[in-house]
Image (cartoon, helix red, strand yellow):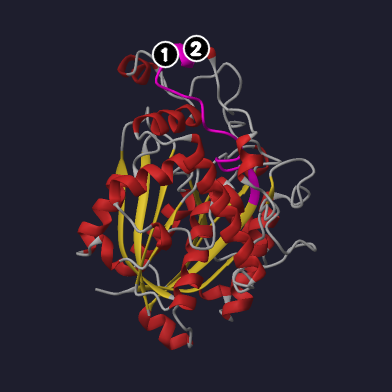
Amino acid sequence: MRDAVIVEAVRTPIGKGRPNGSLAHVHPVELLAHTLRSLAERSGVDPALIDDVIGGTVDQVGEQAMNTTRYALLSAGFPETVPATTVDRQCGSSQQAVHFAAQGVVSGAYDLVVACGVESMSRVPMWSNVPPGKDPFGPGVAERYPQGLVPQGISAELIAAKWSITREQMDTFALSSHRKAAGAWQEGLFDAEVAPLDGVSRDEWVRPDTGLDVLAGLRPAYHDPAFAERFPQIEWNVTAGNASPVNDGASAVLIASGDTAARLGLRPLARLHSFAVTGSDPLLMLTGVVPATEKVLRRAGLRLDDIDLFEVNEAFAAVVLAWAQETGADPRKVNVRGGAVALGHPLGASGTRLTTTLVHAMRDRGARYALQTMCEAGGLANAMILEGV
């Protein structure tokens, strides 16, 4: 069986997903084009050799419609002969792109392929793909869940209640994420992965000066009287400070077979070892990272103690804290350069953003194995294991 290796990984800085955000002026196609162009330049690969470009985008509407990935590669100057597709597995869209790309390499369908993702939440807000008054779920789902599904913020509150996660624990986790991210920037650890764009060279959301007193002063973000009556166990501890913000950004990784990498003189950053995807309760929605972690370890024939680094998407602090309780993972190995609470969560870009950060951290730390997992709307999760080369 052929192997699949990551030979380059790059991302934009992450901007606030607001009209005044540092990247709000950049069309989402151009955000992604910038990473594709940077990927080709940094690797030295002729884009004509790329067999496919697989991109993730969540809200595929407006300026992110019509197969954004295809137009991004054309804008980047890639040959017209290079194909592209855009996938949606919610927050894990671009991690799923990595899975598809690597599986294509292993199967022999590809020799060289890009996995990438983009989301401009300032220009295409979350849920803008569902017009007012329209039901994206349909009558069968309504019949199966007669009390109704809930927004992600309510799921995060339910997770906090089920795992007895306190406001202080979530705020402490958030503070740690900001401090790790700020420290990584100060030490230059992000320099190798970030491609500055239009004068923006740093992640905009990181708050090195925040403190527990500031975080403790924030109001609950999702309090709703109807949900409070339905779920009396909720204590309303999820805030804007211990959840991921809305953001703009793009990221991309270049994946090759081992033979192709050797033939082109490309130095692998990591080998893509094992993959898993799983479904879970769509009400709790965000807990799939637990069975996905168990599943990918089982497929890899590894134990949790074999993993040197973890990237667990910080959609909400409660998700990572519940995952850590269930798995027993060493918190010192988790999101060592900060996570989405501090760096940001541009939905479709986050999967390959995590991968980009992870492979550079693996190289810098000499890690043997690393595990990445992401919770996703609808009760889904992706997980994969990377091996140092």
Q: Residue 96's spot in the image, x, y percent?
A: 42, 53
Reading the image, the residue beneath label 2 is 226
Query: Of helix, strand and loop, which one carries label 2?
Result: helix
Q: Is residue 158 magenta?
A: no
Which of the 4 image quarters holds residue 188?
bottom right
Q: Mark 1 and mark 2 in contact? Answer it, CB < 8 Å.
A: yes
Residue 52 appears in the rendering: no
Q: CA distance from mark 1 to mark 2?
A: 6 Å
Residue 147 visible here: yes
Q: Residues within 10 Å of mark 2 (few under 14, many from 20)?
A: few
**Amino acid found under the numbered disc labelled 2:** Ala
Where is 75 relative to 192, above or below?
above
Work out whether residue 288 or residue 69 is closer to the camera in this orientation and state it.
288
Quadrant position of the C terminus in the picture: bottom left
| Amino acid beneath label 1 | Arg
Q: Position of residue 152 (x, y in %)?
A: 48, 31
Question: Residue 336 or 139: which is nearer the viewer?
Answer: 336
Q: Which residue is mark 1?
A: 230
Q: Which residues are magenta?
A: 226-248
- Residue 220 numbered mark, or none: none
Horizontal side, residue 333 vs residue 198: left or right: left
